[in-house]
Amino acid sequence: MSAVANPATVAECLRVGAGFSQGDRNWIAEQFATLDARLASFHADATELEVSVKDREARGQKVTLECWIAGRQKIVTTSAEEDLHAALNDVRDDLRRRLNDAKTRQEPRHNKHLRDVPQPQAEVDESETTAPRADAETA
């Protein structure tokens, strides 16, 4: 993996959407801090995260986390957990899984040529293919 000059971090790329205030942003960024290692392979100026909640603290609340990375499809994760903290953790973990899956799909298969090379045939010793010796002792 090549090093990125300006790696993306949650603190730099996160926007709070509907249902959250700017005061919630730092708390949410702390919850999402484990995403930093996964986001570090992308440029900060080409990465955006937005978290929003519909019907906050209500029975049918829905937390949505959207991720835009230049050159890739937008990733959207949602959670209907009733506890806001659990819902944030749920969308965070789902985004991490999806980023890992996307990276795995795009990585080259470096060892593919090893699977395509036929294995050499074992050479057969001619002495093993001849008939058994006829001069064996008999009782």
Image (cartoon, helix red, strand yellow):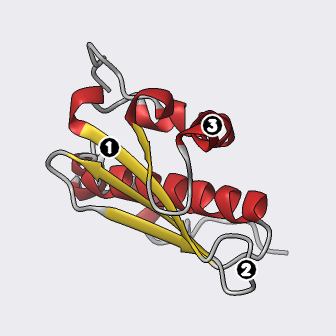
Reading the image, the residue beneath label 2 is 58
What label sits on residue 48 in the rendered view? Answer: 1
- Tell me which amino acid carries mark 3: Thr
Number of the front mark, 3 or 2? 2
Amino acid type at mark 1: Glu
Locate residue 101, reporting x and y percent: 42, 59
Say which residue label 3 marks: 34
123 to 43, vertically: above or below:
below
In the image as oriented, which residue stretches furthest toward the left? 71
In the visual, does 59 lie left or right of 75?
A: right
Amino acid type, residue under disc 2 in the picture: Ala
Task: Please state, as top left, top right, bottom left or bottom right, where the N terminus lies in the image.
Answer: top left
Q: Nearer the viewer, residue 108 or 77?
A: 77
Q: Is residue 105 left or right of residue 73?
A: right
Farthest-out residue, right: 139
| Residue at disc 3, secondary structure | helix
Please provide percent x and percent y for residue 54.
55, 74
* Foreground disc of the pair 3, 1: 1
- Residue at figure coordinates x 32%, y 43% from the top left: 48
Crowd class of label 2 (few under 14; some 14 to 19; many from 20; radius 10 Å)? few
State the CA–CA distance, disc 3 to disc 1: 16 Å
Q: Which label number is shown at residue 19?
A: none
